[in-house]
Image: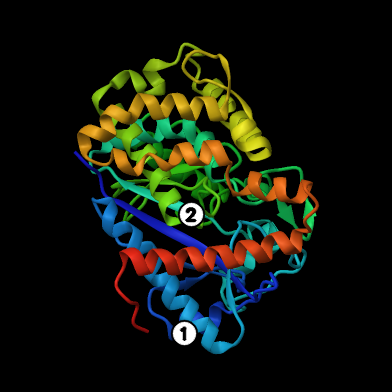
């Protein structure tokens, strides 16, 4: 059994020097498949749901290569890796649509703390009970996916002290999001938040994971993991996605993986929410080197060790479902470190943040070219 998978990819545009430049108004006007964010310096595209991993790599690459060719025609522009304004102005908001009232609310309420780039991973789960069970499990283990993906140790040309500055500063909204016991709970809670004004609309639920669908909160068909920083290497992103899918498939076979049933830490759901939030904060600071508390038995465990345990545990499920080969790059991330850890190591060795980002920009571009040449058809513009 395999589940459908799709991605929402947010990217910064800018110059090879690392300067981030807002181009989304022109991109959205001229290129199909791209949508603007409230700040013009990043732009988003979405991949169509796919059940198998092979086509997903090209689904990730092709829009990005079209975007690269388009912005290169505008001038000396490129795509910028990372999930924060690493060497850019992080004080001023650059509105992409000055007449959009929701964008006005975003700017006035949150400022540039929301001007981040990330990956949202959507996993199709049509059975509503399984969907909410998966949301509960993934909420408890979301810090592991943040730890694997962290790529924002810099902001405004300084080291922040966080491996994921994005998740450290991002305004999780509403401030308190429960572990939903089921679909009726989610509907009642969402309607209450809208009445109270803590959510401006049904999309205004910014937590690490949420149920998603065509008519929220009523018509739901997928889990959306929102915690991941931008993962620029498509093969690494597919590995992270394979780990997520295999864990969900394992949960479908084993109801004890539902935190409502399988936690020996606390029977109080508020305690589990507090544990998940604390683990998220730890992962945002130290990523794979963070000390976390395991939701099942309460033991303290390093994020990298937990990921390694999870990898071993889900491998048989992934193998039975035919995608275990896509899991293997997880070990490379654990060995070499995520992007944030690699960049911080370079900085500790004396490289400037500007040079680190310039090298990362060049590496991202070359990786995409190499993967396209090996695995994808030429991209028509």
For mark 2, does the 10 Å Cα neighbourhood hold few (<14), some (14 to 19), or many (20 or more) residues? many
Secondary structure category for the residue under label 2: strand
Is residue 104 positioned above or below 264 on the image?
below
Q: Is residue 366 left or right of residue 351?
A: left
Q: Nearer the viewer, mark 2 or mark 1?
A: 2
**Numbered mark located on residue 211 in the image:** none
Question: Residue 125 at x, y = what percent?
Answer: 27, 42
The residue indicated by pointer 1 is 29
Secondary structure category for the residue under label 1: helix
User: Does residue 262 show up?
Assistant: yes
Asked if labels 1 and 2 touch by Cβ distance under 8 angstroms, the answer is no
The residue indicated by pointer 2 is 119
Is residue 12 positioned above or below 350 on the image?
below
Q: Is residue 275 left or right of residue 156?
A: left
Residue in the image at 61% along x and 37% along y: 287
Q: How is the image coloured?
A: rainbow
Residue in the image at 49% along x and 22% along y: 269
The CA span between labels 2 and 1 is 23 Å
Is residue 317 positioned above or below 173 on the image?
above
- Residue in the foreground of this view, choosing between 222 and 188: 222
- Residue in the foreground of this view, choosing between 116 and 219: 116
């Amino acid at each position: 059994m395999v589940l459908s998978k799709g991605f929402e990819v947010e990217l910064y545009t800018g110059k090879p020097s690392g300067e981030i430049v807002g181009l989304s108004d022109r991109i959205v006007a001229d290129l199909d498949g791209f949508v603007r964010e409230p700040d013009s310096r990043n732009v988003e595209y979405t991949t169509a749901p796919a059940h198998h991993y092979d086509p997903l790599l090209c689904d990730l690459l092709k829009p990005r290569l079209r975007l690269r060719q388009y912005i290169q025609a505008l001038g000396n522009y490129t795509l910028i890796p990372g999930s924060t304004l690493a060497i850019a102005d992080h004080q001023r908001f650059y509105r992409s649509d000055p007449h959009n009232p929701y964008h006005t609310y975003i700017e006035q309420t949150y400022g540039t703390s929301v001007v981040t780039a990330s990956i949202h991973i959507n996993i199709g789960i049509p059975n509503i009970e399984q969907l909410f069970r998966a949301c509960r499990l993934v909420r408890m283990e979301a810090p592991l996916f943040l730890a694997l993906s962290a790529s924002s140790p810099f902001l405004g040309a300084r080291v922040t002290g966080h491996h994921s500055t994005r998740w450290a500063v991002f305004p999780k909204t509403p401030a308190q999001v429960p572990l939903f016991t089921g679909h009726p709970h989610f509907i009642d809670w969402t309607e209450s938040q809208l009445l109270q004004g803590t959510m401006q609309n049904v999309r205004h639920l910014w937590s690490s994971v949420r149920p998603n669908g065509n008519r929220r909160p009523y018509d739901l068909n997928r889990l959306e993991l929102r915690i991941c920083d931008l993962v620029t290497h498509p093969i690494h992103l597919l590995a992270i996605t394979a780990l997520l899918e295999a864990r969900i498939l394992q949960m479908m076979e084993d109801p004890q993986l539902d935190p409502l049933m399988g936690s020996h830490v606390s029977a109080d759901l508020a305690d589990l929410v507090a544990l998940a939030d604390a683990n998220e904060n730890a992962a945002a600071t130290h990523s794979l080197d963070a000390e976390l508390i395991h939701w099942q038995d309460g033991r303290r465990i390093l994020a990298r060790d937990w990921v390694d345990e999870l990898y071993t545990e889900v491998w048989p499920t992934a193998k039975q479902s035919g995608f275990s080969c896509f899991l293997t790059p997880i070990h490379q991330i654990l060995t070499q470190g995520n992007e944030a850890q690699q960049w911080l190591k370079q900085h500790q060795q004396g490289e400037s943040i500007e040079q680190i980002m310039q090298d990362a920009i060049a590496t991202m571009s070359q990786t995409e070219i190499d993967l396209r040449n090996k695995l994808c058809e030429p991209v028509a513009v």
